[in-house]
Image (spheres, grey):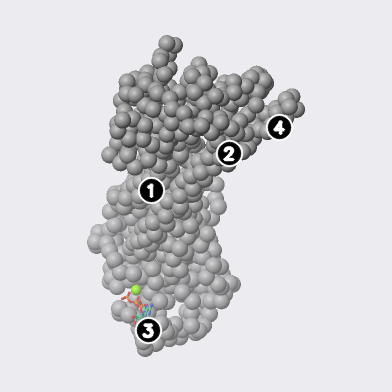
Amino acid sequence: MGIIDIKNLHKVYTDTKIPVKAVNGIDLSFQEGEFTAIVGPSGSGKTTFLNMVGGLDTPTEGEIIIDGTNISHLKSRQLIDYRLNHIGFVFQAYNLIPVLTAIENVAFIMQLQGKSKKVRNKRAKELLDAVGIGDKINNRPGDLSGGQQQRVSVARALASKPKFILADEPTANLDSKSTSDLLDMMLKMNKESKITFIFSTHDQRVMDKARRIITIDDGLVVKDEKVDK
Amino acid sequence: MIWSISWRNVWRNKIRSLAIILAVTIGLFGGIFSYAFMMGMSVQRTNAAIEYEISNIQIHNPKFLLNEEINFTINNPNKLIPIIEKTPGVKAVCSRIKCPGMASTAITGTGVVINGINPESEKQVSKLYTKLTSGKYFEKGDKIPVVIGHKLAKKLKAKVGSKIVVTVANTKGIITYGAYIVIGIYKTGNDSFDEVNIFVESEGFSKLISFDKNKTSEIAILLNNNDDTKKVADLLNIKLKNETTEKNITIETWEQIQPTLNAMTSMMDIMSYIFLIIILIALAFGIVNTMLMVVMERVRELGMLMAIGMNHKKVFSMIMLETIFLSIIGGIFGIVISIFIVNYFNVHGIDLAVVGEGFNSLGYSSIVYLQANNVFYIEAAILVVITAIISSIYPALKALKLNPAEAVREEA
Ligand SMILES: Nc1ncnc2c1ncn2[C@@H]1O[C@H](COP(=O)(O)OP(=O)(O)OP(=O)(O)O)[C@@H](O)[C@H]1O
Ligand SMILES: [Mg+2]
């Protein structure tokens, strides 16, 4: 039993003219403390898979059990609460609230969780220090580079103390320097705080940092390899 | 933090927000201005009617009210008037001999109402003497003086100093003639009043028509405070009937004498609200449209917020608050601007000289002094905010319909 157990996962999009089978029966298990890359060609179903694991989308068939909770049957309102308290997200773009500063963005998610102002600000500051932009906490996203924005996103994802962090192509909009800096930072967090990271990527250099690489094609897992480092 | 996000979101697209704020400001101002204008007009009309024409309360023989005939009189005014004067709230009292007649010059003649007055007591009750456009009011030593309205003067082609012959049936029904010299011409702003009412001294006039000194046609009463009109009228009714033997009298307030005055005021009141509602409906469409644009523009951001765990209630409040902020800012501007402009024109008046003729013939002054009570300001402001809240419900619900998975997937 892992932190996430996925059984016979299927997703068919039916809102199109011809139904699209995006995920066709995935069985997987993730353990606590993993640093895993999901790779595969465009259209292979990576985003669809991650969205279901993150509770943003509901499976057509199959089950996702997170820490003993089957989230495949939760209602959309229940899922919102579940996501808030158990899952951290980093997206490719449009990640942050543009009108809030870095520290406010990080504190915001803790406010949604009902944490006190003192706790929020203290933890937000610590996390921003930890992701390496402690000197830019009062900048708004528009005044930060893409790499810095993704660092704030990681800090925000960590702030809610989730069971794991999902990141769909977090580096797709970044240059190679920022990409490798961000990955190093994530890896450091993973090592130091045992945070589980699951991210999708097209980028070979990102895959090279992962310690488990799951390859998906046509909605099926075609390769699942552990990399020893 | 939702409050501060909403507040900051207001300023993300400054031009669009300012456009909405301006729309609220102008809409509110338009509503308040038109209200203040109509209120000013009707309050002025009412005040003018009280000050120059009716006073607060009048007493007549009930038959006189049906037919303004010289023989339908009140008996013993000398006994009634002291009682009235002693009644609390009464400022001044005067009596008038009133009858229909004909005024003519060498050129033409026309029907008039002759008011036989005692200039001294008349001045205490009616401010008509302040409304002379040429000549002067009655003074001791004037010979056969008459004061006429500007409209009548024009009709008769009379000027100060002109001779006017008044033809009238005396108390015995015999036609008599009296010659008068115009000493003053007045203009109250109500042309229909100015056209028919002429004023002569009761002293000489009563002799001309053999009118009994112990009688009068009309007693006019001015009060200290118009709000007491009803109360004082009721009191007089009891007092005069208890303390005198005079049963043949009818006491009426200005509202009873000219019910149209109040009807016009209520109509203008209703019209102001209708106008305000029309403005608010237009505003609502503007707000719905703008907020839908806002939601469409922020699909990804809203999707992201729901993805990370912002629940429906909070997303909904965030959009609503943004609209409420917009409308409150516009509302404050609208109220402040309205207060300034209404107060300015409350003092200086808006001169409608160009169209004034038409207003005067309807009895309305051509200079309108704007007037609005605080209640209307508050009501208008509250209505604007309620409108904003109602019109942001649909856009906010639209935001909740977003599917976060789809929203974050949308391409840049
Ligand atoms: N909302 C949708 N409705 C219909 N089909 C969809 C929808 N979303 C995705 N698809 C289809 O599902 C399949 C899997 O898409 P998905 O986005 O999961 O792939 P991906 O591996 O993330 O691709 P990429 O690397 O380009 O991001 C594709 O064929 C895609 O066109
Ligand atoms: Mg994808």
Q: Are marks 4 and 3 on the same chain?
A: no
Q: Are marks 2 and 1 on the same chain?
A: yes
On residue B65, which mark appears? 2
> Which residue lies at the image location 59% right of the left edge and 23% below the top edge?
B212
- Ranked by sequence position, the earlier of labels 4 and 1 is 1
Q: Are marks 2 and 4 on the same chain?
A: yes
Q: Secondary structure at mark 2?
A: helix
On residue B27, which mark appears? 1
> Which residue lies at the image location 56% right of the left edge and 68% below the top edge?
A78
Q: Are marks 4 and 1 on the same chain?
A: yes
How far is mark 2 from mark 1, CA to CA?
A: 47 Å
Q: Is mark 3 within 8 Å of ligand 1?
A: yes
- Disc nearest the viewer among 4 and 3: 4
Q: Residues within 10 Å of mark 4 (few under 14, many from 20)?
A: few
How far across and how far down the image is residue A89, in percent? Answer: 43, 63
Q: Residues within 10 Å of mark 1 (few under 14, many from 20)?
A: many
How far is mark 3 from mark 2, CA to CA?
A: 84 Å
* Residue placed under numbered mark 3 in the picture: A16
Q: What is the three-letter code of the residue carrying label 2? A: Leu
